[in-house]
Image (cartoon, helix red, strand yellow):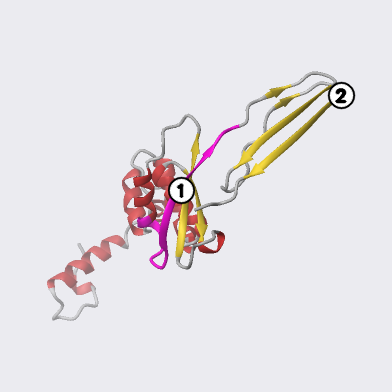
Amino acid sequence: MADDKAVLLPKNATAWERCNSRISTRMLSVPVALILKERDPMRCDAAFVAPLAWERSVHYWNPGDDAGNRARIASSLADHKGYGAPAALEAEIALDTGYVIAIREFWELPGLVWPDFVVDVVYSAGAAWPALAGVYASALRRKPPRDVLDRVRVFAETPPAPIVVGAACFASFHGTVFPVDGAPLPPSFAVGAATRIVCVFTVSPFVR
């Protein structure tokens, strides 16, 4: 414990100030290398992971995902720079719900006006129907204060089936591209000689 005579506190210093001075003096004796280690989310002991997440205002925390929590803490400063952007909102809602999410701004859809936006949920055939209440709750919690959630829409996504063709034949594949970011995965083809394949895609427009 530090001697009160060795500090620069005035004689009328309060008990709290004297106690804080003693604690600060003890902290100065901690090796700098140890402090740097425990401040690094990728190297710190498990006991320091949650406090670091609180300190850096990590928005998503999964108690069962230590590696993911550490990675989100490490990227928190960069993440905060992008909060409010559609890509960041999509990523946060996707983490909350486990669904593929696309954000549509008011200028992308007819009938919307600023500051409305729409959340699209991609539904894979055969999977359980999305829990839209959870999507609404996440979108309202994560959205920027200036924006207003207009509605949540669900779009089905059906992966194309493999097509196997032989020699000297003609095959045509017709798929549907739903209004979400990116086209569906291309079909798998196993072809022989003298084969012609025509892929036709129908793009479904956005509708209210």
Local packing at callout 1 (Cα closer than 10 Å; few below 14, some 14-19, many 20+) is few
Front residue (pair 45, 62): 62
Query: What residue appears at the point 41 percent right and 36 percent down from the top-left corner?
Result: 129
At label 2, which amino acid type do we have? Ala
For image coordinates 69% across by 24% down, the residue present is 163
Q: Quadrant of residue 203?
A: top right
- Picture disc at residue 78: none
In this rendering, the answer to whether 46 lies above or below 110 is above
The span picked out in magenta is: 140-159
Q: Which mark is residue 194?
A: 2
Q: What amino acid type should be assigned to the residue bearing mark 1?
A: Arg
In this view, the mark in front (2 or 1): 1
- Which one is in front, 14 or 199? 199
The verdict on residue 83 being magenta is no
Is residue 31 visible in the rendered image? The answer is: no
Q: Is residue 171 above or below residue 48?
A: above
The residue that disc 1 covers is: 153
- Determine contact: label 2, label 1, CB under 8 Å: no
Q: How many marks?
A: 2
Residue at x-position 35% and y-position 38% = 64
Q: Position of residue 162 (x, y in %)?
A: 66, 25
